[in-house]
Amino acid sequence: MNYLIIGGNSDIAKDVIQRLTENGHAIHALVRSEEQAEQLKALGHTATIGDATKEAYIKQSVDEAKQKGDIDGILHCVGSIVIRPPHALNQEAFEEVITTNLTSAFLTLSIGGKAMLRQSRGRMVFTSSVAGSLGLVNHEAIAAAKGGIEAMVRSAAATYARRGLRINAVAPGLTDTKMASRILASDAMRDAASQKIPTQRINQKEEAASAMHWLLTDAPDNMTGQVLHLDGGMANALV
């Protein structure tokens, strides 16, 4: 099987890549640096170095992934964390959040989906957040971006259901990754964050990666347009 990872440098994406590698799958990834590309090459994979918010790099990644054959699955694992109230966020910063998260996801859907339509099959998995569906203090920008991804996934799943594409998303809560290190920098900050979660603990990257891997490889064929909430029960509880 042949998989394309957009945002292969993230902690969660690296875990997914490891799982796919262990099962003997071919992988091409879009990453940000030569060092990250070399790490993939050491695993026997290939990489494109570039910016996931630029159409040219997404197209290059898809074209290079297709050199290995049909693309069986695409994972979009690009994101950012900006926790700031609207009055403290200017237009430029807001648009950067939208571009990083939502625009890159749309480009992946549009360009990657077009390649899959020629195959009449394929699975796509996008990365959302608990903020996409739950009102969290100071999360307005990221909520707009991730909420847009969730709405896009539901619509695209309906649009392409009869053409063999299965499109889903995973929406983790706060996860212990390098991206979240600034808001998990001390025991006190970790404890405060944990108190907002019904399970009383921070997500682990392996949990999100496991769900993404499952959606890419083993989920039922009739599962599409779904958002898997890996938030420790936050979406279903008053916190």
Image (tube, helix red, strand yellow):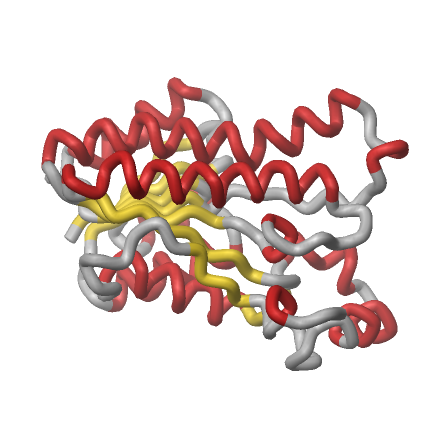
Point out residue 185 in the picture as x, y percentages from the top left corner: 80, 63
Residue lying at 53% horizontally and 33% vertically, measured from the top left? 102
Instruction: Residue 64 in the image: state x and y as whole percent.
Output: 24, 31
Would residue 195 be visible to someone looking at this image? yes
Q: Residue furthest top?
A: 56
x and y percentages locating residue 163 in the rendered image:
15, 38
Horizontal relation, residue 124 to residue 145: left or right? left
- Using the rendered image of the protein, determine whether residue 35 is visible from the camera's viewpoint: no
Q: In the displayed structure, does residue 117 sit left or right of residue 52?
A: left
The picture places residue 183, in percent across and down from the top left corner, at: 78, 58
As displayed, is residue 182 above or below residue 126? below
**For residue 79, what is the image quadrant?**
top right
In the image, residue 80 sits, relative to residue 228, either above or below, namely above
Residue at 71 percent across and 53 percent down: it is: 135
Number of numbered discs: 0
Which part of the image, by quadrant, shows the C terminus? bottom right
Is 27 rendered above or below residue 119? below
Name, please, the residue furthest toward the bottom.
Answer: 199
Give the quarter of the image for residue 233: bottom right
Q: Which residue is at 25% across, 48% downward?
A: 166
Q: Quadrant of residue 177?
A: bottom right
Residue visible at 63% across and 43% down in the picture: 80
| Left or right of 197 on screen, residue 86 | right
